[in-house]
Image (cartoon, coloured by chain):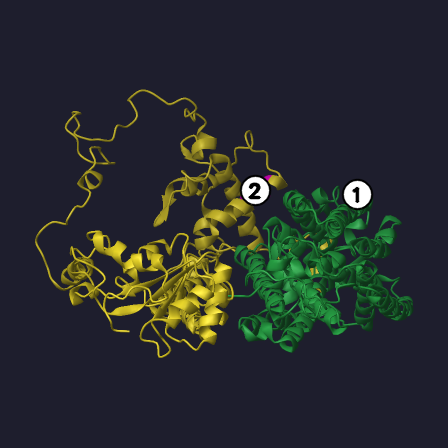
Chain colours: A yellow, B green
Amino acid sequence: MTEPHTHDASGHDDHGHDGHDHGHGPDHDGHGHDRELPDGKLYGVLAEYDTPGELVEAARKVRDAGFTEFDCYSPFPVHGIDEAMGIKRTILPALVFCGGATGTLGGILLQWWCNAYNWPWNISGKPSWSIPANVPIAFEATILLAVFTSFFGMWILNKLPQVWHPFFRNERFNHVTDDAFLLGIEAGDQRFDAETTPKLLKDAGAIEVSNVHLDPDPESRQMPRWITAFIVASTAFALIPFAIAAKARTSRSSEPHIHIFPDMDFQPKYKSDQPMDLFDDGRENRGEITGTIARGSLNADDLFFRGLENGQWTTGYPTTQLPITEALLKRGKNRFEIYCTPCHGYDGRGMGAIPTRVASEGGAWQARNLVDASNPVAINMPNGQLFNTISNGYSTMMGYAAQIPHADRWAIVLYVRALQRSQNASLEDIPVDHRSAMQMPEAPIK
Amino acid sequence: MSALQKSLHPDEKYKAGKLGQSLSKIGMGIAAVFLAISVVLGATHGDHWKRFLYSYVIGWSYIFSICLGVFWLVLLHHLVRGRWATAVRRIAEAMSMAFPLVFVAGLVFIIPLIAGYTDLYYWAHPDAALCLEKTATGCHEYLNPTLVHKLGWLSPGFFAVRYVLYGVLYTAMAAYFNRKSRQQDETGDPNISEKLRIASAPAMIVYALITCFAAFDILMSMAPKWYSTIYGVSFWGSACVGGFAALGLMVLGIQRTGRLTHSINPEHYHDIGKWMFAFTFFWAYTAFSQFMLQWYGNLPEETVWYKYRLFGEWQWVSIAILVGFWAFPFVFLMSRWTKRIVPSLVFFAVWQLVFHWLDLYWNVMPSYDWLTSFHGGTQLVSGPLTGNTALHHVGFSPLDITVWLGLIGVLLVGFGRNLRGNLIPIKDPTLGMSLAHENL
């Protein structure tokens, strides 16, 4: 077991050459020393088999012979080899399960902390914490951690990456990721015998059995310095961004920002309302040219486009363009519910979703009550002024000219009028033959 | 022979012999008894066979889905040049040959439909799209915009044509794969495997399309105003859970008769169990995808389908399916041992077969309770318009069980008819690898 220079003990000539083949090549295994081999301790024997099936058979024989310190090497997973080698089942599935479960719980916890605890945010009145909405994230987090555990767990449990192993000195071992099916028995095994063990492997169908010796130079059995240096250096570099971020969070600086992409941050163009030397007025914005009107923008009809009649807010309605029909009223309802209800509310009383939210946050702001008979500002506005308010705004309300076309603004005016009437209706407003419905003891709920 | 190949054990009993006839006889007995009871119960139910036909559609979808599941294994095995399943492939082939009988059994609800029966599928009613809205001045009539466009597709005649088309295509594909496979038993020609592999790709596409459309037609159109594009996929996921569970039980049953005892071992059960596990999750994934998009989108015409199922009495069925069809089997089938210890696998196979039925029941039955209203002497089915889910009862009936069991009897007859000759493809080139199959 310890004799140096031992060639294959089974007496086959071709096996003995293997070690010498290693010897004359300078440095093919990357250790950087030119030396004669083999001259170290015998590490073990390596047998090559032709097919994965033969490898499985050989592994079974080696196991049955009582060996424990051996391993099989193949380019791909071989079905049934675990059982043939008699190795215990891996604990990886249990680890993956734990990783996945951590992902599930972590994903849910993250969403609860963000959405429901640390920064609850009202989005369209939806609950800030709802299990179905959390499922996709929890699912993805489960997959992520399960896969990480599986991937890195496999590497760690296999003691990979292994940068040095005595078998690397065997030339055939270079083919183990390509087309070689190898079985190696270590000399340290209790049953190992320099004569009978190679014979056992040969009898199990090996096409080649070779002895592998340790490199006599203990330096060569360590991880190459440059790998260690690389790991240390890359780890240090990876920490730099975190260090910079940590420093920036705790210190003040009068220096301007670091611009990583200056040509993206400072583009050679003008943005709206920037000063500019090119024109006399010093402005970048170029308005409409004096004395011109764009095609289709003449808007000569004061009544339809501005709600004016003889320079006064009209109390009429542009029936030339918009005959008053039920369809127009429904259109007005539809537009009102899209653009106006967030503030004014469905009933026009000024308590839409936004004022309601303001109230829920302890504030006090509400939109104009459009239908209030006791403070009839909106009721008393002429139609033209209502139209103008929608177009150009009123008090804190923004104008909606950009979003709502003229005809739709008039439709909204129509609907607001209907709303004002319905919210202040008396029994007399209801047609006679329908009044009985309002006087029923229990009004049906629709 | 290397360790990755094994030849058929010399003492192996791989001939079916009288097995098929016995199974057919058992099936016929079950079918005769339970369908007779069902007919009596259906006739005395006093609703013009409505309940009977609802139960029948559920039971029929059940036996149809099991054929779908096992036939999918046959197609996939050829498509990917599978190895492990060669030992059980003949059994799956024989089971998939129940398609013609299943489609004949389905005529029980197809024929009334063509004859003008409108209580089963409400779209069959000539005024199906007509809706009534109560207004202050009386009844306002309008055509449901979703349904009015679907009624061309969902007309009894066209529906029946498609039904026949599905039946013919499934039967033709299953018969082709059966015939060629048995031909290989005689000739041992390895080119047959290659031919089947080439045929499996277009067959898989046809299978996917007609499975999707069959699910849309037979199950999704129970709620014709509702739609979900993933519905067919989700149904197929559920079907494969049932298919693999049934395959596992069938293989075990055959082994209990002393046949195939050397060829099929826990490695094969393990793989059947893996598929069961995979589809348990796949079904849950697709079913949740369907739910979440509609829940988030919050459109009334979509959420109404779930409103019926997630509130009131049906919510308990929904919870039972979530826990029973997914959570419990998912957690336990994850482990290796639950799939390799045969009694444990049998437990989960039976369990999933029951819950697969409950899943179909949950898909179909909430449509049963749709409110009907009378207008001008014509019964108008107005669809799920009521907002009060408390009105909707699970309304379990003994018919559901008796029809289900009766149709399982029909399915067993279908299986039995084709369990003949060799129970294993003796000359398939991949058989050796399947027999020596070991899981990692």
Identify the element where label 2 is drawn.
Answer: helix
Q: Residue furthest top?
A: A291
Q: Amino acid at mark 1?
A: Phe
Residue in the image at 67% along x and 50% along y: B212
Taking A335 as reference, is A279 above or below it? above
Q: Quadrant of residue A17?
A: bottom left
Instruction: Find the magenta span and give its range.
Output: A328-332
Residue that mark 2 sits on: A331
Q: Quadrant of the N terminus of chain A?
A: bottom left
Most common SS among magenta residues: helix
Question: Which one is nearer the viewer's eye here, B330 or A170?
Answer: A170
Question: Which one is nearer the viewer's eye here, B94 or A127?
Answer: B94
Q: Residue furthest left?
A: A254
Q: Is residue B197 magenta?
A: no
Q: Are marks 1 and 2 on the same chain?
A: no
Give the side of residue A212 with respect to residue B7, left or right: left
Which class describes the residues within 10 Å of circle 2: few (<14), some (14-19), or many (20+)?
some
